[in-house]
Amino acid sequence: MGRAVSAELVRNSDIDGLVVASRSIERAEWAAQSLGGTSRGIRSEAIDVRDEDAARRAFDSSGCDVIVSCAGPAQETERPGVLAAVQASIPWASLCDDHLVTEELWALRDEIAAGGIPVVSGCGLSPGITNLLVTLATAEIDEVEEIDISLALSSSDLRGDASAQQFLVGLDRQAPMVSDHEPSFEPAPGAARLTYFPEPVGWVETFPQGRPEVVTLPPRHPQLRSLQTRAGLVEKAFMDVARVAAAAGAARTSIGRRFSLLAVRPLRRAAELLPPGGAGWTAARVDVRGTVAGRSHTTSLAVVDHLTNLAAQPLVAAALSLGSRSAAGRGLCTVEEAFDSSLFLSRLTQRGVRIARLEPYPL
């Protein structure tokens, strides 16, 4: 994902230079050279954002206007990275999709706000595009009562170890939700539900899975009665493999997750080919229910694309807005708080992201 984001940034004429960073200087150098190297203003650096002090020193000396983080898993990298960016007074945008990390950061909102710079922790597909879909849907409803957010992920889209590890973590944890106006939890892995996504994805088994939206959306909708986030792999066979790995405790430690991914890597392609085969696409769906003029109303919106597009494009759009100092928010912000939603979505549509409205056909 980092290479995709870097490539998109390099293509933009507003970018004067780019520092490509990784824990491995060899990987950072390879990525920088593949993008054009110093002749195009691209240099490499070894930075381990898990070390807050080292990251702050690196940020201080970087000369960068924005820190764009694709590092993961978020439980290891997000908090120290954010705090280092705040201390260095450099705006931060990331792909953080861990609800426990989001809770930790939200508890530090005053400390982060004191830095005076915008911090958009979670600016990809979910959270990110899903927040914008909820914003669009709630604009049509007088009183929002229920929000359901569902993801269908393709194993062929989860090529990065950080993304795959985070998915395993989600299968092992209790899933937070809102039920009858109160915070609640669903035991892992929870009950399967068939969820429809626009073609070519179709029907996918989804499972309750904690996402940062469960932390950030309820304060914006005080009348909310129900909120749940779900996710599943479009390849059912591979979803079964992931559930077995999580049930065996492989998701509870970093070593266990990495070992599991290494062990199943030779089987990934075989699992993808087993029936029913996956579509190789990722999708997100948002269902918002409430009332309009006293009558029940549901708005359902969805997106389908490859994960590299759905995650990279919002992060790139956020980085460009932060770099131009056009962000509306300061301190810790969600996407819809930090940026003008209409302008942000317009930028995404220019890069090929399309939104579908799902409506029942009256018979």
Image (cartoon, rainbow, N blue to C red):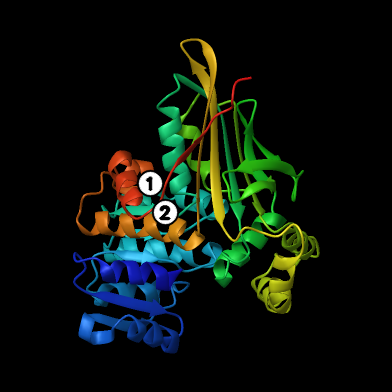
197, above or below 294, in the image: below
Work out whether residue 11 or residue 121 is closer to the camera in this orientation and state it: 11
Label 2 environment density (alpha carbons within 10 Å; few <14, some 14–19, many ≥20): many
Work out whether residue 60 or residue 258 is closer to the camera in this orientation and state it: 258
| 15 left or right of 240 in image | left
Q: Which amino acid type is shown beneath numbered disc 1?
A: Val
Work out whether residue 308 or residue 354 is closer to the camera in this orientation and state it: 354
229, above or below 291, in the image: below
**Callout 2 secondary element:** loop
219, above or below 339, in the image: above
Marks 1 and 2 in Cβ contact (< 8 Å) = yes
Q: Which residue is outermost to the top?
A: 294
Which image quadrant is residue 142 in? top left
Tag 2 residue: 123
Q: Position of residue 53 (x, y in %)?
A: 39, 73
Which image quadrant is residue 281 in? bottom right
Q: Position of residue 177 (x, y in %)?
A: 63, 38
Label 1 environment density (alpha carbons within 10 Å; few <14, some 14–19, many ≥20): many
Q: Which amino acid type is shown beneath numbered disc 2?
A: Cys
| 154 left or right of 205 in image | left
Name the residue: 30% across, 50% down: 347
Q: Position of residue 38 (x, y in %)?
A: 24, 86
Q: Which residue is outermost to the bottom?
A: 26
Name the residue: 50% across, 10% down: 294
**Callout 1 secondary element:** helix
Q: Quadrant of the C terminus?
A: top right
| 113 left or right of 226 in image | left
- Mark number, residue 335: 1
Q: Which residue is outermost to the front?
A: 363
- Mark number, residue 320: none
Name the residue: 19% across, 64% down: 14
